[in-house]
Image: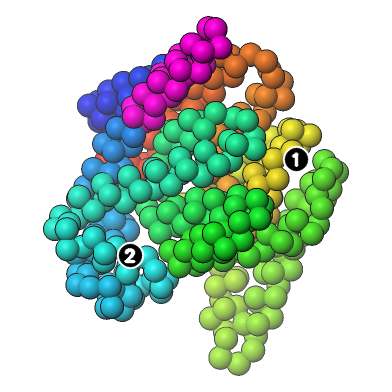
Amino acid sequence: MDLENWSIFLAGSFATMLFFIVGGMSGNASERVNGRRVFDWLCVLAAYIVGLYFIGLRPINGGSDTPKYVTTFMALRDVATAHAIGIQYFGNTEVLFWPLQALWRPFINSGSLWLVLVYTLTFGLSGIAYSRMSKESGAPAVIFVMLLFSYEAVYFGNIIRQVMSYPIGIVGVYYFHRRSYTLAALLVVLAIGLHWSSIIFLLLPGIWALRINSKSRAIIFFVACVALSHLILLLAQRMGALGGLMSISDKAAYYSQGVTNFGEIYHTFNFALSVLLILIFVISFDLVVEWPVVSACFLLFSGMVLVGVSVPTLSERFITNQLFFAPLMSWAFLQRFVPRAGILKRVILASVFIAMGVLVFSQESSTYTLGLTNHAK
């Protein structure tokens, strides 16, 4: 990024984190609740503005996917034909994403304005998901703003359908756990309709059936997922040996090299962070296990990342879901070691995510995706 963009990013980041920290300062009970509410909302507003500048208002010709998204949206005519247009222009087959976009196409005649709307919806859905998870974890819901200072910010501007779908799925799991089955089913169906990857939410009963209620069982689960990864690769190769399916074998052989769109998966920043989050989960297990929705979703997403180690495109697909929990896992880790120092936890969290934001926005792939540079490696 150039100096102007760095200045805007750093100014917005420090304003966001300052409001976040001040929101945790103590006073008497009444002042603490009211003051925290005001400063937390100011924190959310500041973070939204930072994201609006870098994500919502990104150039419509920036990156690889944004131009295709905008072209497809502008081609929409009505709900009835939206699905077919999505297949024709973008190539995705989800049944709900483009029909839902077609609902407000008559009111939006600008691709840039649509990107702002999509960013706002994604930002809001993320906040709603965190507000539900905070009810069982006790973590401040405002920590969701830290997502904008992680690689999730790039995903917000790239894999739009997926980052819009899994927060809805998480909320669905929350209501399922509270026995609101009809609402939960509707939300999970909506999530799947926005992006096929959310079909993995249907695997959650299996996660609960495993009864991973101890640290040793969690470790066994993660190790088993890594072992299963190689079996899946072998299965794909065996299937490829069948007549007419050779392309599957070819792709499996290619994927087994560990090469992805972002380089070797074992060397990427996101995969290293994914492993770190798993370690944090294990270290903080005694605390996190008391958060049934959070722990089940994290186990599910992390399991998919590890199952895909030998098939990196699969791992890549679900790293974004797992990284969505980075602020919450960081809070759990701090709660484990500094349980009573609320203000200190906020200071540490703010410092870590500002540093992470600088690191993320220093990557050329990030600036390319968000239209802040003209090319990527």
Q: Residue tagged by mark 2?
A: 100
Quadrant of residue 4 within the rendered picture: top left
Q: Does 5 sit above or below residue 171?
A: above
Residue occupying the point 44% across, 33% down: 145
The dot on residue 289 is 1
Q: Mark 2 belongs to which amino acid? A: Leu
Nearer the observer, 133 or 195: 133
Q: Does 47 sit above or below residue 236?
A: above
Q: Mark 1 belongs to which amino acid? A: Val
Residue occupying the point 29% across, 56% down: 66
Membership of 22 in magenta stretch: yes
Q: Position of residue 229 (x, y in %)?
A: 70, 62
Element type at mark 1: loop
Membership of 45 in magenta stretch: yes
Does residue 185 appear left or right of residue 116 in this picture?
right
Task: Indicate which disc, 2 or 1, sits on the residue closer to the N terminus.
Answer: 2
Q: Position of residue 285 (x, y in %)?
A: 76, 37
Element type at mark 2: helix
